[in-house]
Image (spheres, rainbow, N blue to C red):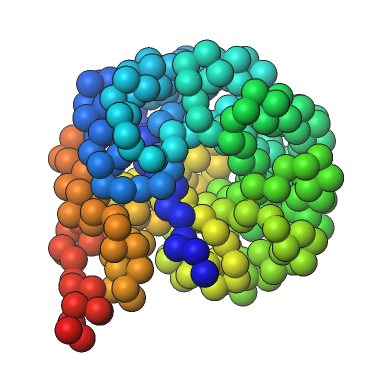
Amino acid sequence: MSPILIHEVGPRDGLQAEKQVVPTDIKLEWLGRLMDAGLDIIQVGSFMHPEKVPQMADTDELFRCLATQKRNSSVILSGLVLNEKGLERGLACGVEMFCMGVSASETHSRKNTGMSTEEATRRIIAIALEAKAAGKKVQVSVQSAFGCGFEGLVTEGRVMRIVEEYLASGLNAISLADTAGHAYPAQVSGYIQRILGMDPGVEITAHIHNTYGLGMANVYAAMDAGATSIETSFGGLGGCPFTKVAAGNVATEDLVHGLQRGGERSDTRLDGLISVARDVATFFGRDLPGCVYKTGALPAESSEKG
């Protein structure tokens, strides 16, 4: 099996709901260190209206600056777009991978995008195909895939209908987002197995929130079921500002620590990730939800055996 890919979403999902805006130069410093840590994908920001999400107002500038700093790094820089204007901005400033999605919850969809699920699906597929035609990597997601803070249960059928539309359009890099944090391991595993049954070649990403304490269990269930990528955030920071109970992500350094304990992802600099998480906590003046940045790391199992 190929090593699990790690998609760091802290610069976007981690920061988007914070009221204290992080200056651009500090973001660039954090992003540079994340790039040096050997992550696979880093989500630099989202192309939202600056009045709606002030923390993301400098996303275009960040991409332009990083294009000159990237040097020989193999990391992929991703950006979140919600509409045609976002795609236009992303294409202009050098986004390498476009992430976009549709909520399976009607209530969350309208709060997040002002559109129904049906309308959002139609528009997102069109935008995704345009990005692909421009030669960009594209990942489409189903948000609120495992439940909604406003509606509660989101049926599996609603989720799979969106997935079917993506696959029918030739979009086979799909993220399942646990926006409200309602997922549990058997559910995560079952959804991924069902999607792989539709198309064994699909690339599945799991975006898990830890609202009710099952975050890491759900991540491991996703990996065991065949997910190829996991989205995490430095220090576990984050939470969708348009859901009812916002809570953090699984912490990047916690996941890397767990993988390295089992002899995986030794190519990733855990000390660098811990350093960034500590600096983010210092900047905001509070503890973050993550564990390893506070406790320090244990040695990898392979080194213990040696």
Q: Residue at x 33, y 75 (%)?
A: 262
Residue sitting nearer the eye, 210 or 98: 98
Q: Residue at x 18, y 73 (%)?
A: 299
Farthest residue to the bottom: give it: 305
Left or right, 224 with reference to 152: left
Res 290 seen here? no
Q: Residue 122 in the image: x percent, y percent?
A: 80, 31
The answer to which image quadrant residue 41 occupies is top left
Q: Residue 159 in the image: x percent, y percent?
A: 75, 53
Q: Residue at x 61, y 21 (%)?
A: 87
Q: Residue 135 in the image: x percent, y percent?
A: 62, 28
Compared to 265, does 273 lie above or below? Answer: above
Res 179 seen here? yes
Compared to 165, does 269 lie above or below? Answer: below
Residue sitting nearer the eye, 118 or 91: 91
Left or right, 253 with reference to 121: left
Left or right, 305 with reference to 243: left
Q: Residue at x 23, y 61 (%)?
A: 292
The answer to which image quadrant residue 226 occupies is bottom right
Q: Quadrant of the C terminus?
A: bottom left
| Numbered label tally | 0
Q: Residue 211 in the image: x percent, y percent?
A: 46, 57
Compared to 51, does 229 lie above or below? Answer: below
Compared to 125, does 172 lie above or below? Answer: below
